[in-house]
């Protein structure tokens, strides 16, 4: 039997961080992320990034270079309360500004104020957004069932006890794999707050069993996995995508299928 619950390098656990609004505190937070080797996705408002500082686009691009720049609308409204034509404008203008900064398609998002609805989801999909994070923390390590309603594990203020649980069960076949932590860097107002974040990073970093990924990397990888073409006897695998993928066979054999290649076992 083939299982998809294997990630780059044959790892079975994922950690990702997600921060909203593009506050100046992102600079210090990113320094910590880079120090501990974790990945973050930063959801930026076009209007906010121009009012927080006079940084040039090249400086903003450099700041987030090891992480992902993602959408958060232009002006941080409430998508569920916004007329659909207005929401389209908010998302598409946000994409245009951020893509000029990032230099790549910006197709991820988080819902401002955690506000979403079926209509808002439909607008996001029509605007080319492939995932969007909610603020509905599950307290669990779940993979997204719907990337446009991607519920995180927890806010960073609640993460430390869950770090212990995540690491204690890291070798279990019966637990879910994704620890998704979200927040706002503007909430880091005291040295105690910063110490709390660093404690989370210390607990989760430098673990060879964990894939540290951005939101879009997780989306792209899981999408590529599902495009694998597998023979009936589960011995021939063709990967038509541009991303290397891994699968597990019979709960013991990890198979690597490089991008664009066929693997026979």
Image: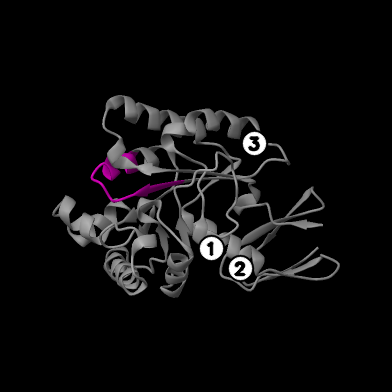
Q: Earlier in the sequence, mark 3 or mark 2?
A: 3
Using residue 226 as the reference point, say whether residue 149 is left or right of it. left
Tag 3, which secondary structure?
loop
Could you tell me residue 71's position as x and y percent? 35, 61
The residue labelled by disc 1 is 220
Residue 65 visible in the picture: no
Estimate how packed mark 2 is, as few (under 14), some (14 to 19) or many (20 or more) residues with alpha carbons within 10 Å. some
Tag 2, which secondary structure?
loop
Which quarter of the rendered picture does the N terminus lie within?
bottom right
> Relative to 130, is 44 above or below?
above
Magenta residue check for 228: no
Could you tell me residue 218's position as x and y percent? 53, 56
Which quarter of the rendered picture does the C terminus lie within?
bottom right
Using residue 263 as the reference point, say whether residue 113 is left or right of it. left
Could you tell me residue 163's position as x and y percent? 53, 32
Residue 22 visible in the picture: yes
Q: Earlier in the sequence, mark 1 or mark 2?
A: 1
Q: Residue furthest top?
A: 192
The residue labelled by disc 3 is 170
* Residue drawn at (53%, 63%) of the image: 220
Which of the 4 quarters of the picture holds residue 74?
bottom left
The residue labelled by disc 2 is 259
Q: Tell me which segment is drawn in magenta.
A: 17-31
């Amino acid at each position: 039997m083939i299982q998809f619950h294997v990630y780059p390098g044959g790892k079975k656990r994922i950690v990702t961080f997600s921060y909203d609004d593009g506050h100046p505190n992102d600079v210090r937070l990113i320094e910590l992320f880079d120090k501990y080797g974790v990945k973050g996705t930063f959801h930026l408002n076009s209007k906010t990034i121009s009012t927080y500082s006079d940084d040039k686009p090249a400086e903003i691009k450099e700041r987030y270079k090891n992480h992902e720049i993602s959408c958060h609308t232009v002006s941080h409204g409430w998508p569920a309360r916004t007329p659909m034509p207005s929401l389209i404008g908010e998302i598409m203008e946000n994409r245009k500004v951020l893509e000029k900064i990032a230099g790549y398609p910006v197709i991820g998002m988080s819902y401002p104020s955690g506000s979403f609805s079926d209509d808002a989801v439909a607008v996001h999909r029509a605007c080319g957004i492939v995932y969007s994070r909610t603020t509905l923390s599950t307290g669990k390590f779940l993979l997204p069932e719907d990337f446009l309603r991607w519920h995180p594990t927890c806010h960073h203020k609640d993460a430390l006890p869950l770090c212990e649980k995540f690491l204690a069960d890291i070798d279990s076949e019966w637990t879910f794999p994704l620890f998704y932590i979200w927040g706002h860097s503007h909430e880091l107002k005291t040295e105690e707050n910063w110490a709390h974040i660093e404690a989370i990073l210390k607990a989760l970093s430098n673990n060879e069993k964990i894939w540290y990924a951005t939101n879009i990397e997780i989306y792209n990888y899981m999408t590529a996995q599902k495009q694998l073409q597998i023979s009936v006897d589960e011995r021939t695998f063709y990967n038509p995508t541009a991303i290397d993928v891994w699968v597990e066979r019979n709960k013991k054999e990890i198979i690597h299928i490089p991008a664009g290649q066929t693997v026979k076992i």
